[in-house]
Image (cartoon, rainbow, N blue to C red):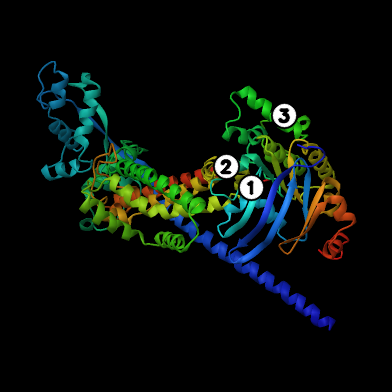
Amino acid sequence: MNKNKEQLLNKRYKAEQRFRLYGLSAIFMALLFLTIFIFKIFSTGYSAFQKTWLIVPVTFDAELMMLDQNPSKEDLQDADYYDIALKSMADLDPNANEDQENELKRMVSYFFEKEIKNELLNDPNLIGKTKEVYLTASDDLDQVFKGNYPRDLPEDQRRVSDYQLKIFDQLVANGKVESKFNISFFTNADSREAELAGIASSFMGSIFSILVCLMIAFPVAVLAAIYLEEFAPKNRFTDFIEVNINNLAAVPSIVFGLLGLGVLLAIFQLPRSTPLVGGITLSLMTLPTIIIAARASLKAVPPSIREAALAMGASRMQTTMHHTVPLSMPGTLSGTIIGLAQALGETAPLILIGMVAFVNTIPGSPMDPAASLPVQIYIWAESAERGFVEKVSACIMVLLGFLIIMNLFAQIIRHKFEKKWS
Amino acid sequence: MRKNGAKMIKIKAKDVDVFYGKKQALFNISLDIEENQVTALIGPSGCGKSTFLRCLNRMNDVIDICSVKGEILINDFNINDKSCDVVRLREKIGMVFQKPNPFPKTLYENVSYGPTIHGMAQSKQEMDEIVETSLKKAALWEEVKDRLHEPGTGLSGGQQQRLCIARAISVRPEVILMDEPCSALDPIATAQIEELIDELKKEHTIIIVTHSMAQAARVSQNTGFFHLGQLIEHGSTDKIFKNPDNKKTQDYITGRFG
């Protein structure tokens, strides 16, 4: 009998140990996947925060620029920079033939003419002189410099020719290639050229969408939650509403996108591709999340507080507004932020309402066309150029950073303002 | 007010029935409560004494499925009448609950809440006075006068309960309902509250629900005994405890059931 008991006890301990092991291995697996995921993104994406520049001597020849003597500011604006830009690139190899000169030109971004112009506008005294100017390298050379480009491919399968590589290697040897922090990634809008593409448009688009979403979803959801939790009678009808709010939370986001397309764009004729429409569509999605969070935190306010206020002669409205709602706010706010974070990462509904369009301007208001960060990731991931690969990862990093900050904020609100009950 | 030794009746309950949905919780309760006296309601758990107490300031309204029938006259005015304004009623009838439930705000805000919503103070100074007198009457002033702006939830259990009493008396109610106010407190805190109750009856009519028969004997002048939703017996505390008419009362008092 005693021996039996001991066996039974041992068995129970063993079972517990096994269970712990399963739990640990599950957590280990999850961490492993997360680490691989983050490592992959960081290792591909970090180089996008660096940009490669070629340092090229430019001679500001007044004659080539068609400038008179003592040119005014407007003259400088209207001057012809193409020839000196072309010439400075061609001068990199004095023996170059016409084809090779063309190849030399393609070593920098098509924006190089503008970069040279800006240099002169900053310092008009440069006319007639020669200065070394930083020019954005083409995205392929950028990748070569970062070591992401397979140089050993046969030449006809590469976008960079042997000749370009030879000149580039000379420049590297002479210290005329430099890598600097990529400011334009944050200040430029999207571009067809990988070396010029930035996230400014999609970042602002995301911010505007989230703001519109917040301004619509938060008040509606909080009012709905307060009414349902504090005022509505409990009957079949309110049960029905409750079930449907939960159903709404489970509706696939693309359905909301179709709703936005069919109602906001087709019937109300709101401007296409704008954060306004995106935000309204996202707010439909966020609404149930906030309602559920707000109701849960209203429920968490102990009934004794309501009773205390009611017994003091506070009306139902006063009880709700003076006590219940303020006490539920931390929970409601952190639920709201989590709902917004979900909306921030949403792609499908935005694609349907046209926020997937190529936008090369930075939106100044929610009424201007814009992309959004997840849609930008989608657009770049579709692009063929090698330069966009690292941009995709970099954009994911920015989006993740944004999300982490928002969730951190939600946590802080929850911990800092949540009241402890007696 | 007493006239020629006869005690004034403050609250008169007539044939009160209470239902939770289809289940009847109180049967035909008729009970007179004397002014400026402490009336204790005793009985085993679930006998309906708290339910009856909550009828007196219509706190049962909060529960959707609860319905109250019968008349409850306070100052000869039926509070179950449609014309009765619940907010006015609760201003006159304060309540202290079983578990101390101060608002998670400062001590000052706790006590000043009632006077604020009922517009009882014209100036900050007047409000300060109300807060001070209320806390003094609740025998809490000396302990907390230096930390009026700290949260009320930081006090000990007994202090919290006295804070709740101070909050209840801040609006000068005529009646104070107490629902087992000492059941969550230790003996010392209980003794303080009982002393306080004795003091408060000079200005207020007090109805206290209690589990402790000893407490009922100590603090009350009148006692009502509830059992299974019926009011079995009521009368002066002396009589109920020493010479009850009903056998059930006798059995409960002597600890044979309950």
For mark 2, give the secondary structure.
Answer: helix
Q: Are marks 2 and 3 in contact (CB under 8 Å)?
A: no
In the image, is A107 to the left or to the right of A232?
left
> Where does residue A36 sit, x and y in percent of width and height?
47, 58
Q: Residues within 10 Å of mark 3 (few under 14, many from 20)?
A: some
Instruction: Name the foreground residue: A230 vs B143.
Output: A230
Residue B87 marker: 2
Q: Quadrant of residue A40?
A: bottom left
> Where does residue A367 sit, x and y in percent of width and height?
26, 41
Q: Which residue is under mark 3?
A: B133
Label 1 and label 2: CA atoms lie apart by 10 Å
Sequence order check, earlier mark of 3 and 1: 1
- Residue at 67% in and 61% down: B26
Mark 3: amino acid: Thr
Sequence order check, earlier mark of 2 and 3: 2
Chain at tag 2:
B
Label 3 and label 1: CA atoms lie apart by 24 Å
In the image, is B130 to the left or to the right of A73?
right
Q: Which residue is under mark 1?
A: B57
Instruction: Name the foreground residue: A371 vs A390.
Output: A371
For mark 1, give the secondary structure.
Answer: loop
Above or below A69: residue B33: below
Outermost residue, right side: B242
- Residue at 14% in and 33% down: A82
